Image (cartoon, rainbow, N blue to C red):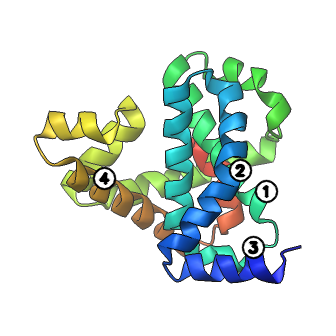
Amino acid sequence: MKSDDENELLISIAEGDEEAFASFYSSYAPRLKAYAWKFTRSREDTEEIIQESFLQVWLHRDKLPGLDHVQAWIYKITARCCLQWIRRQTGENNRVARLAAFNAALVLPTPADFVQWQELKTVVETAINSLPPIRQEIYRINREEGLKPAAIAIRLDMPVGTVKNHLSQAIRSIRDQLLAFGYPVETLIVLLFWLL
């Protein structure tokens, strides 16, 4: 259960308080780095995973005050980011085998989960296809090719900040469409790593 101090901190973050977010980061980042290190064994890749994890926290900060188990929530986000990293490292052909090796940190999906993921994949693809063309292109390059914003910026000859903005907006649009289809935030945190 959250303490009053923690609840006030989460409310401040939800309202856009960057100092409160920095405090939250200082509290959780060391533990999350140790967790991500178990997957990557690379300082650079671990830092990238932590950066992506906290970007997701910031994008979803409006949900923080309503969470009962903040630590579990942020670990799930980081687990998803680790799994995205694994997918980029191993490629599609042996992804399932490599994920099984990290089973100790995650719950294995059930057959019903796979059915739900197929439905979710259809909704996500529809959401991606509804993005403006440049946003869709940036999103697909990032997710399908695993390129970082700096590399995408070079390829498309645009500022890195613009690429990051398009990527954030794409993620937000997809999340909003998923929520509109009735997928609860808790489900998205667990399932989206398979699709995004």
Q: Secondary structure at mark 1?
A: helix
| Residue carrying label 1 | 72
Q: CA distance from mark 1 to mark 2?
A: 6 Å
- In the rendered structure, find residue 55 and report the number of the disc placed on it: none
Q: Within 10 Å of the Cα at label 1, are there few (<14), some (14-19), or many (20+) other Cα atoms?
A: few
The amino acid at mark 3 is Leu
**Crowdedness of circle 4 by 10 Å Cα count: few (<14), some, many (20+)?**
some
Q: Nearer the viewer, residue 132 or 119?
A: 132
Residue indicated by mark 3: 67
Name the image quarter holding the N terminus.
bottom right
Q: Amino acid at mark 2?
A: Lys
- Label 3 or label 1, whichever comes before in sequence order: 3
Measure how far apart labels 3 and 1 are at the Cα level. Answer: 10 Å
Residue 164 shows which numbered tag? Answer: 4
Ranked by sequence position, the earlier of labels 3 and 2 is 3
Disc 4/disc 1 C-alpha distance (Å): 27 Å
Contact, CB < 8 Å: mark 4 with mark 1?
no
Residue 129 position in % (x across, y down): 33, 55
Does the rendering let one see residue 92? no
Q: Residue at 71% x, 26% y: name it.
A: 38
- Label 3 – label 2 distance at C-alpha: 13 Å
